[in-house]
Amino acid sequence: MVRFPTSAPIRLVLLDAFDTLVTPRSAPHLQYAAVAREHGLQVSDDDVKTAFKQAFRSTSEQHPNYGLQTNIASPDEWWKQVIQRTFAPHLHSQVTAEQYDRCIESLSSRLVTRFGTNEAYHLFPDVVPTLQQLSHFGASNNLPITMALATNSDPRILSVLKSFNLDRFLQLDVHATATAPSTTAAALQPPPTLSYFEKCAKPDPRFFHAAVRRASSPSAQLEPANVLYVGDQLHEDFWGAADAGLQAAWLQRPATLHSNQPYQQVLKDRSSQQELQYARQRTIPSLSSLVDIVTQSHTRFFE
């Protein structure tokens, strides 16, 4: 049994998406390069890796939040711009302007479609069993335990998770309410919180507070202390949630070698002995640990 220092009974479990629920089947730049070669562009994996990081960062700076603030028509169009910049001819020695012009439209459309489905992603094996157990936990114990997605993303992550049938367990409609009449487990869960719609992103405390508000109702207001956030990123997920007053679990899977995210925001150093000890005590190796953590949080405070 996992020992986890909970500070209050957990009423809501908030889940990160990327590298927590799903992860790319191979690194995004490798998939980009493979699809580009299928379209006739002779590119190297290393060149695509460097160009992708540069394109993602520059597009994020010029058009924050997937272009919502700069009137880009949709996140799909924002990603097409990243892809077009990634394969710019001057970044690849064997790609001519003519080749680029001939295939870039079909290439960018193909990649946008691919990364909106399970074609590009792998679902971790502990996800479905954990969500299944947590969805039954509240009913079997007569306790109001809910789960919700809260992640830095545009709406495409919702179609990815739906392609894995996770809408059996999680509400993946941003416009839904947890009180809508339905007998399905997912419909009883709070709606997802995405940085795209909130116009703020982890580790900003406003993001976490928005997720707590979205999971609350007039008759059941949640406090941050009764919410557990789970994610794989130390600064964006773990410290972001902790600084916002939530309980936090840092997911570090044994096979995790590096993040597939282009970059993460580090606001300040968190390397004091006290902070390192705090993080170590709240590190979990698998999502399956959540069942023990939720159970212990209620046993500790109610028995």
Image (cartoon, grey):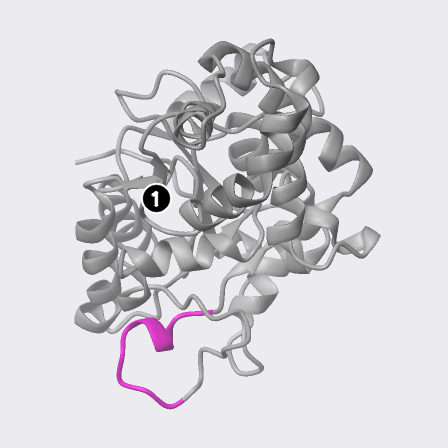
267 shown above or below 172: above
Judge whether residue 212 can be spotted in this image: yes
Please provide percent x and percent y for residue 159.
Answer: 42, 59
45 shown above or below 193: above
For this orientation, the residue located farthest to the bottom is 181
The residue to which callout 1 is attached is 21
In the rendered structure, the answer to whether residue 250 lies left or right of residue 183 reads right
Q: Quadrant of residue 144?
A: bottom left
Residue type, numbered disc 1: Leu
- The quarter of the image holding the N terminus is top left
In the rendered structure, the answer to whether residue 41 lies left or right of residue 86 reads left
Q: Quadrant of residue 96?
A: top right
Part of the protein shown in magenta: 181-190
Q: How many marks?
A: 1
**Residue at left offset 58%, top offset 52%:** 154
Does 209 appear in magenta?
no
Of 166 and 79, nearer the camera is: 79
**Residue at left offset 44%, top offset 84%:** 179
Q: Most prominent secondary structure in the magenta stretch? A: loop
